[in-house]
Amino acid sequence: MINKTKKGQEEMVGFALILIIVAVIILVFIAITLTRPQKEEVESYEVESFLQALLQHTTDCEDYLEYLSVQKLISRCDSGGRCLDERDTCVVLNETLEGLVEGAWEIKDKGGYLLEIISGQNIILSLSGGNITSSYKGAIQILPGENMEVSFKAYS
């Protein structure tokens, strides 16, 4: 009878040791998961999507028929056009893009951005903020029917 009791006690101790080992492994896994730095780096698809959305944004510059998108406003700025309320299209473009970029891209301690609109060899607009580093994700959009390109770089 004494041998049966000792065997049962040994099994209980073994089971308790297995539970303790499993608990320690789970705690180590949770600690590693929680201390891992969160992903802050910008992905290229985010930059490309932002640039596409930026070009389609409707501005407050009114033409005779409609409010102009940023893409149409870029063309009007290049040709020296004016809004219906006589504001210069380049000024409206600059104000609109500053608001959109600063609202969408939170500048971290070491990050920044650069937005350039180039027509042929001339820079129509250049906006930058934060720190420009050697590490960035970027996108370029060539405007159809124009000799212009819009480039955006997000620095990390």
Image (cartoon, grey):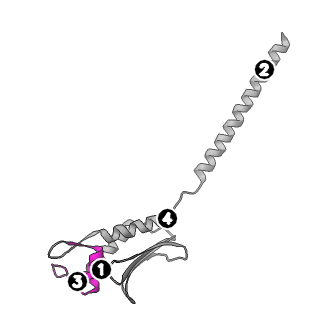
Nearest to N terminus: mark 2 or mark 3: 2
- Circles 2 and 3, Cβ within 8 Å, touching? The answer is no
54 over 37 or under it: above or below: below
In percent of the image, x 35 and y 67: which residue is there?
53
Which residue in the protein does label 4 denote?
43
Which residue in the protein does label 1 denote?
74
Q: Can you name the residue that lies furthest to the front here?
A: 145
Is-magenta flag for residue 81?
yes
Region of the chain picked out in magenta, as a range: 67-95
Nearest to N terminus: mark 1 or mark 3: 1
Is-magenta flag for residue 68?
yes
Q: Amino acid at mark 4?
A: Glu
Q: Is residue 111 visible?
A: yes
Q: Nearer the viewer, residue 149 or 89?
A: 149
Residue 33 appears at what percent x and percent y? 60, 49
Nearest to N terminus: mark 4 or mark 2: 2
Residue 39 appears at what percent x and percent y? 53, 59
Q: Residues within 10 Å of mark 4 (few under 14, many from 20)?
A: few
On the rendered image, what quadrant is the N terminus found in? Answer: top right
Residue 9's mark?
2
Disc 1/disc 3 C-alpha distance (Å): 12 Å
Q: Secondary structure at mark 3?
A: loop
Residue 88's mark?
3
